Amino acid sequence: MKTIRVGLYSSVAIATTLLVGMASAQTNAPDTAQGEIVVTATKQSNTISRVPISITAVTQKTLDQQGVKNISDIARTVPALTIQRTGADSAPQIAIRGIYSVAGSPTTGIYLDDVALQKRNALSFSGNGSPIPQLFDLERVEVLRGPQGTLYGGSSEGGAVRFITPAPSLTTYSGYARSELSFTDGGGPSGEIGGAVGGPIVTDKLGFRVSVWGRNQGGYIDHIDVWNPNVKYKSNANSSKQRTARAALKAQITENLSATPSFYYSYDHSDDVDTYWQKVDQSTTTAFSRAATATVPGYSYAAHTYGPYTQFGPFTSGNPFTSPRTTQIYLPSLALDYNAGIVSVKSITSYIHDKTSGAVDEAGFNGEARNLQGGIGFVSELQNFRRTIDFRNKRDSFSQELRFTIGSPNAPLSFVGGVYYQHSRIKSSSEIYENLDQLAMVLRGLDTTGVYRAPLLPGNLASVRYQTLTDEEYAGFGELYYRITDRLKLTAGVRVSRNTFEYDQTYYGALAGFTTPTLTNGGLSAGKQKSTPVTPKAGLNYQITPNDMIYVSAAKGFRPGGVNPTISQTTCAAGLALYGGNPPTTYGSDSVWSYEAGAKSRLFGGLASVQASAFHVDWNQPQLFATFPGCSAQFTLNAGKAASDGGDLQIQLRPMRGLTLSVAASYTDSRYTRQILGPEQVAGATRSVLVNKGDTLPIAPWNVNLSGNYEFALNSVWKAYIRGDFQYASAYNRTTGPGTVAYAPEQYRAEATHYTSARIGAIQGPLELSLFVDNLLNSRDTLSQITGGRGTCRNTACTTYAINEPIYIGQTFRPRTIGLQAAYRY
């Protein structure tokens, strides 16, 4: 791996040298700036080639032509951006440059214009994850790679993703409309329609922008009865609906002062998850028995043989029920801009109310059955067994930023800085319903109280969990840009924050082992954490020519700590023993230091552009997400040290009239650099290994996106284009490696993935019509594998293990989809 990293850095150095050489040869060449995007990543407007950070910006038109429908599609086209889903109740987890974690606060900032959307994860089933805006009526999407702690604050250790909306115009009218109809192999049809319009109400005084959009997406997963393959519970179960609306008004109050109130709404509902059962092999359980005592009768349970169940494969599931999820965002905001020439002031006031609710069906995955039967969740005597987890998550957040800008990006001296305040409160709850009395009697000959030391609550309610998580932040920040010479510029900045985190948790029910929560039994817990992070940044950039730049930078990122949920002492007893008892109630903050070198160049009059960068990240005390073997409980701890090395490359060429070729590639080597051991259970006893030195994070090392677009005239009125996109992600390790508690051989290695799409279109003025095929080659590469095979291994070779799950649950791309799209832009 060291050889690969050295080779990568050498390649970037060679590329930079070549760019410098070509730039020198191009000193007098004109640049038409064709296609260059203006971004606001540094909270000032500048062309992307003049911003000394690694950044990708994608316009709405490009998103449409690439067939991008959601954040996962964006990740296939942007270097070093990774999207993963970790469960039915969770939103996508986003990572940049290998800084990945599903625990605690996010590692990637998510912004709608200047408003932060990211929120901390509440562990256990709770509707986790940051809400993501819908991809309609956007000016562009900006992906900023590397820590953005100075200007964007905590939870942007890996970078930030910004969704920028069109501002109301006071002078000109503009509009955008899009409709689509598509058909998926073996699935239901999909369709969408939306429109946006804006312009002056009173020229130079008052303007507006409004948009509304909706999409219905057909499903392609069928639910089939495990016991009777001829019975289909539901076809195309994983259908979904998305809606969004936005309204903004801009008033020019005085010559220097303007006000822009806006309101954003988003609705995202899925009827079910996109997972399917890959296979269910034949499995035979081991008979077990219990000797009678004075108070407990004897009991024996015979061996059972299950399967093979051959009705399963891609796009079929044995879950009798679905796992729906709904997320809504309500976001009013007010932006005040005062521009007095060299000095400008901006105030952004926002309020976020978002809520997520849903359910998770775990009918075939009861922990009691799996523990007693070596990983098999089926019980033939109880074919109507049901286990459902209902969850809700609500956040209310207020934020205020006051930002000052002195000078322009091209001035000898300029400054961006200000103050920031945020108060956020998350309330989450979850309930587990299952017919435990019947299950306990079948498997153990006892009722629920006899097994768990507590009875079921009314309605088969097995456990209840509530969490209230409150975050408050005060911060001051600033970045200074000083032009040392005409070509050499210094960037220096720092952010100082005061963060307070409070938690209040309640947990009770049969699965907890008690029905009345107290401080003594752990059912009630509350506390507070405080921190004062300082996140500096420094950099130098050298403008070789007006079109060519090299830069170096060092920046720090920060993420606050959090709290672990209460763990059941009954259902998780075996797992707790492996870890040496209860994990700590809380876990600490983590931080990164990132070092980056890069180059940007526009060559041959703008016919070619190149961006290249290499980075090294030191990650201190990363928050490690872990699960207890034998139960679904989750917890977080700080895992010593990690590091991430790599680079990214973006090239765009226009070798002939009408033809555009693009390459976007990245390499990321993200790994733990220290071994982490579990707590000592008994003095002198061997401690469990949580992480081995060299274990990698679940990030594909190589990501490559290739695209080509050829545009040509059909006649004097119409022009046409042909476009193709190909994405590749290399194989990677999903879990920690052999010898660790979480090692699961059949889930350990994730395969490489390949995805191809194609589109042909015709354009006449503002109208664009296109025919597209997504997943052209009908790839079924596995994107994730949630369960299956051996787990909780007792030795490195995994010849002895606690469970061997016969159900392999995976996720793959949506099957080949063919559709028609119409777009109108003016």
Image (spheres, rainbow, N blue to C red):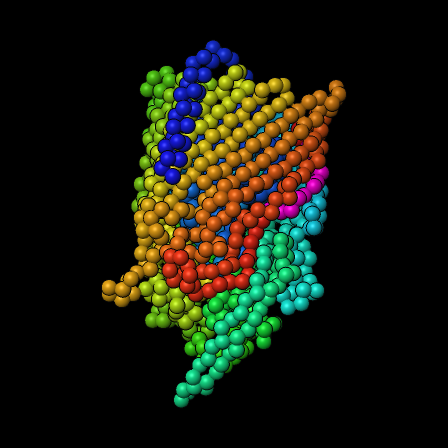
Instruction: Report the label total.
Output: 0
Is 388 left or right of 158, judged from the image as shown?
right
- Residue at x 67%, y 64% (from the top left corner): 229
Residue 509 in the figure: left or right of residue 722: left
Compare residues 406 and 54 and report the one nearer the observer.
54
Does residue 336 appear in the picture of this structure?
A: no
Question: Is residue 183 highlighted in magenta?
Answer: no
Q: Quadrant of the N terminus?
A: top left
Q: Residue 751: horizontal and vertical position, in percent? A: 52, 46
Which residue is situated farthest in the left direction here?
Answer: 684
Say which of 521 and 625 sits in front. Answer: 625
**What percent of the width, then of the height, locates residue 652?**
54, 25
Residue 816 location, quadrant:
top right
Q: Residue at x 51, y 56 (%)?
A: 786
Q: Residue at x 69, y 46 (%)?
A: 184
Determine which quarter of the picture holds residue 492: top left
- The quarter of the image holding the C terminus is top right
Q: Looking at the picture, how far across and down is residue 115, in whole percent?
A: 48, 41
Residue 504 against residue 549 in the figure, above or below? below
Q: Can residue 184 be seen in this snapshot?
A: yes
Region of the chain picked out in magenta, as a range: 813-824
Q: Relative to 735, is 51 above or below? A: above
Question: Is residue 249 or residue 546 the one in the foreground?
Answer: 546
Residue 183's quadrant in the figure? Answer: top right
The prevailing secondary structure element of the residues shown in magenta is strand
Compared across the picture, whether 414 is left or right of 662 comes to left
